């Protein structure tokens, strides 16, 4: 029996709902930046070591000076991630074929260590974010599956993996010291989880409002 997943057909409402969803994710990240900016100062004051205090104070100063840059960089990076994934979602071939044809194995040797390390960190951050919004992500995935007519989770441009990659790339654009970069990633990730849960719930409501029926959602 031939599966109806062989040649996915994207829902014509895809661009509209994804653009609105991207806007909601940008707002969630912006809110997380604001919260970290207010929390990190008190954390510095209560630090148990001078080194930890100095790093936290440096991170606070970076956010005070560069929050607009960080928001802009995330918006740009996330849009690029979304466009990359949605381009694959519109491809007529199956997910495995698309991944195979898009992979440039020769270029992997040219990736520098910092980028590899950021990829590993992004995977860990994505796992942490997923843990914070697992139920909402499951619901979102069911709606995105219906939109792209493909159950492959990698076709979901809004999943935590894409957000984590965009966030870490945006933080890297600040050109902060390594220890400050780590602190910013740690605390932004900590705060972003609950924000993302709320954001996913809003996106699901938007999709439901568009009359999109979820596919494969398990109701407990």
Image (cartoon, rainbow, N blue to C red):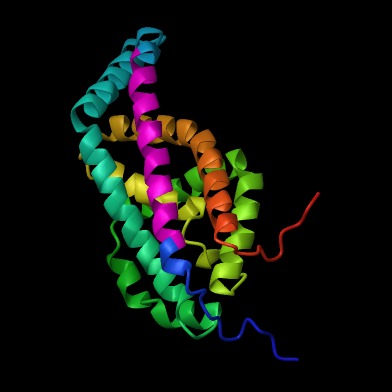
Q: In this view, does 125 lie to the left or right of 63?
A: right
Residue 145 position within the rendered picture, expressed as x and y whole percent measured from the top left = 60, 67
Residue 152 visible in image: no
Range covered by the magenta-colored residues: 17-41
Screen quadrant of the N terminus: bottom right
Q: Residue at x 31, y 16 (%)?
A: 51
- Identify the image quadrant of residue 32: top left
Residue 89 falls inside the magenta stretch: no
Nearest the camera: 204 or 177? 204
Q: Which residue is drawn at 47% across and 68% down?
A: 14
- Relative to 107, say whether 52 is above or below: above
Nearest the camera: 215 or 123? 215
Give the main secondary structure of the magenta stretch: helix
Residue 134 position within the rendered picture, expressed as x and y whole percent measured from the top left = 63, 45
Q: In this view, does 62 lie to the left or right of 3?
A: left
Q: Residue at x 56, y 40 (%)?
A: 197
Residue 30 visible in image: yes
- Identify the image quadrant of residue 178: top left
Residue 37 position within the rendered picture, expressed as x and y whole percent measured from the top left = 33, 23
Q: Residue at x 31, y 47 (%)?
A: 74
- Relative to 35, say whether 214 is above or below: below
Q: In this view, does 2 lie to the left or right of 207?
A: right
């Amino acid at each position: 029996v031939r599966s109806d997943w062989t040649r996915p057909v994207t829902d014509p409402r895809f661009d509209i709902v994804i653009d609105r969803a991207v806007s909601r994710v940008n707002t969630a990240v912006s809110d997380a930046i604001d919260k970290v900016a207010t929390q990190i100062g008190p954390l510095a004051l209560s630090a148990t070591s001078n080194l930890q205090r100095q790093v936290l104070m440096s991170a606070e100063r970076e956010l005070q000076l560069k929050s607009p840059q960080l928001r802009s960089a995330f918006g740009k990076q996330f849009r690029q991630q979304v466009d990359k994934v949605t381009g694959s979602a519109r491809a007529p071939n199956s997910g495995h074929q698309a991944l195979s044809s898009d992979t440039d194995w020769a270029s992997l040797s040219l990736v520098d260590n910092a980028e590899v390390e950021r990829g590993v960190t992004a995977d860990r951050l994505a796992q942490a974010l997923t843990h914070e919004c697992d139920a909402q992500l499951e619901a979102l995935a069911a709606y995105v599956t219906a939109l792209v007519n493909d159950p492959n989770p990698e076709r979901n441009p809004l999943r935590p993996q894409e957000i984590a990659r965009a966030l870490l790339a945006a933080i890297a654009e600040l050109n902060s010291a390594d220890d400050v970069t780590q602190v910013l990633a740690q605390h932004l990730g900590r705060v972003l989880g609950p924000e993302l849960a709320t954001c996913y719930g809003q996106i699901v409501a938007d999709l439901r409002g568009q009359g999109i029926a979820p596919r494969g959602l398990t109701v407990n």
